[in-house]
Image (cartoon, coloured by chain):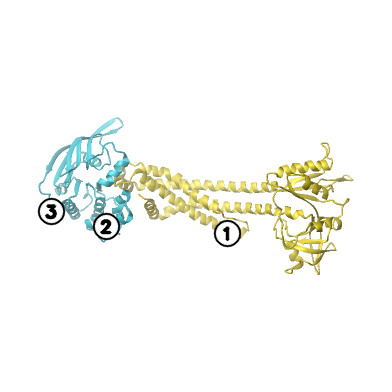
Chain colours: A cyan, B yellow
Amino acid sequence: MSVVISLTDIRRVFTMGDQQFEALKGVSFDVSSGEFVAIMGASGSGKSTSMNILGCLDLPTSGRYLLDGIDVGGMTTNQLADIRNKKLGFVFQGFNLLARTPAVENVELPLVYAGLASKDRRKKAMMAMEQVGLSGKENNHSGQLSGGQQQRVAIARALVNDPAVILADEPTGNLDSTTTEEIMGLFTSLNRQGITIIMVTHEHDVAAYAGRQITFKDGRIISDTQTIHTGKTA
Amino acid sequence: MNFLQTVKIALRALRTNKMRSFLTMLGIIIGIAAVIAMMAVGTGASYVISQQIASIGSNIILVMPGSTTSGGLRTGTGGAQTLSSDDAKAIMADCPSVAYAAGTVRTAGQIINGNLNWSSVIMGGSPELFDIREWPVVNGRPINQQDEDGAIKVCLLGQTVAENLFGSADPVGSIIRIKKIPFTVIGILDRKGQSPQGQDQDDAVFVPLRTAQRNLVRSQRSGIVSAIIVKAKSEESINKAEDEIKALLNQRHRITNSKEPDFSTRNLSEILAVAEQSSKAMSMLLGAVASISLIVGGIGIMNIMLVSVTERTREIGIRMAIGAKKNDILLQFMTEAVMLTMLGGLIGIALGAGGATVVSKLLGWPTMISIQSITIAFFFSAAVGIFFGFYPAKKAAGLNPIDALRYE
């Protein structure tokens, strides 16, 4: 399978005044297309920093990051915005939907910035809504949806532009255990359809859904394990 | 990201905080309404002035006799009988910058038609007078050179006189008596309205100059006129014409440097230009006051936009994460600010126009709302939005997506 993400010796140094803090101390790993990867680690381990770099929200101080074959290093902020728009889908812990905006328009948002015509946007958004099992809820505002449903809208928004990778940052952090199962089931089934997912979590049972767990500690990878079977079945 | 989409997003953002949006707009609404109302009053006033200028006729120079002393008593300007019909003819013939010159005499008296009578101004004037004052005859015929040369007893009536002596009947051809002397009415003059001094210009009767000199006014010599009205060839030549007239009359009246001139000239358009200028200065002043309120309103917009950017930091983070570029965010907040001010501008235009109409109805002030002032107000309100919306929008666009996403 083709490599979607390739990190080589990624370092990230934050400078605060005259203090320097190395959040990532040489991280290298590849993710192939169709993988479901869980990134684990305690807070301060560097998992969020690596997620920001994977999400093209931040650039590494040194090292090489190839996303879908494109070298992200040295890109301008506008180019990075373009890459985020076309190659990545984001799912956040706090859902991060726009308030007082119908679900379907939230899903359409990446396509708005991609410059798609309104007709095509609506069509693709409706398909993504169907993929996450929310047909019929298109016009509900986020206030009229449950937490699980809101996260489904967020997942639909991440899916809508056919990204190379979906990046999920603690996607079940704000959900109860039943809804967590429901959302992880959705991720698993999307992964089976061939969608690459990278997920940050600190919960082991959530990480168990992924086929591969990468654990961070003090800015380094301390373990990278593959499970043949893709975790629990939904 | 297309423009329509940006506008839609901006409108939604404004709708979510209706009360706040309205209060923010209020400054602009008041400012623009004030600008529109002030400009309406100012334009109305200068329109009236320009109408009055047109009613006198354009490029007019008035030549008046000087004062005279008899038995130690000095009369005021115009008291002497130093100007004559021949002076008027000479001005017209010898001054190259002069188009027309007409001698006039002026008196007042009772005018009688049957059992109706009316006291009015009686003007004697040579036929050129009506060309100078651009005053056509609407019914009947004007005074012509034969009337003048023959000192025929014919007259033209102003509208007010015609109404008071004839009511709705047609006066042309009737015989009326002016100072007990019978005159044939040959025509009715067009309605002229008020003079800049507020006199009813239609309350007058016109007779040929020589007729008036012989029958209606008393003078020491024949051919004396009480004033000469001159029309310069163009607006540019009006000062030159004045100089030519002075030189010619100095020569004709044998005025040397040591002798006071026995006449004076007045340039009427100049007087009116001053009046117009003062009305312009007044509306400029009011405009400045209105502009200050617009600036205050603009600062209000900036303040609220800054609050809005802080409140919506997370939203900005989301938008950036899923692909919004700096310019998209900048444009989004700029559009919001401009929509606020333009909407405020539109409401202000409506209010200002309404206010001006009410003022003109209640106080009887002439007001005019020009398309130009509406256009200026509209674009000015948009400019206020651009100017005061830029800083908050720049701040929003400069946010770091990682920090923005984490913002609580």
Q: In this orientation, which residue lies closer to the viewer: A55 or A49?
A: A55
Pointer 1 and pointer 3 on the same chain: no
Q: Quadrant of the C terminus of chain A?
A: bottom left
On the image, numbered disc 3 is attached to which residue?
Answer: A233
For disc 3, the chain is A
Instruction: Return the residue nearer the eye: A47 or B183.
Output: B183
Indicate the secondary structure of the residue bearing disc 2.
helix
In the depicted structure, whether residue A42 falls above or below residue A127: above
Task: Nearest to the eye among marks 1 and 2: give it.
Answer: 2
**Marks 1 and 3 in Cβ contact (< 8 Å):** no
Three-letter amino acid code at the position of disc 3? Thr
Look at 60% across and 51% down and name the residue there: B42
Left or right: where A62 falls relative to B165: left
Q: Earlier in the sequence, mark 3 or mark 2?
A: 2
Secondary structure beneath dot 3 equals: loop
Residue A216 x, y percent position in the rendering: 17, 39
Q: Position of residue B149 (x, y in %)?
A: 83, 56
Asked whether the beta carbons under mark 3 and mark 2 sit within 8 Å of each other, the answer is no
Q: Is residue B86 left or right of residue B21?
A: right
Q: Residues within 10 Å of mark 2 (few under 14, many from 20)?
A: many
Quadrant of the rendered structure where residue B355 is? bottom right
Query: How far is the residue under mark 1 from the one under mark 2?
Result: 54 Å
- Tag shown at residue B358: 1
Q: Are marks 1 and 2 in contact (CB under 8 Å)?
A: no
- Residue B173: x %, y % from top left: 78, 67
Residue at 20% from the left image edge and 38% from the top image edge: A7
Q: Nearer the viewer, residue B216 or B291?
A: B216
Label 1 to label 3, Cα distance in Å? 76 Å
**Disc 3 from disc 2: Cα separation:** 27 Å
Tell me what residue is drawn at x 78 percent, y 49 percent. B228
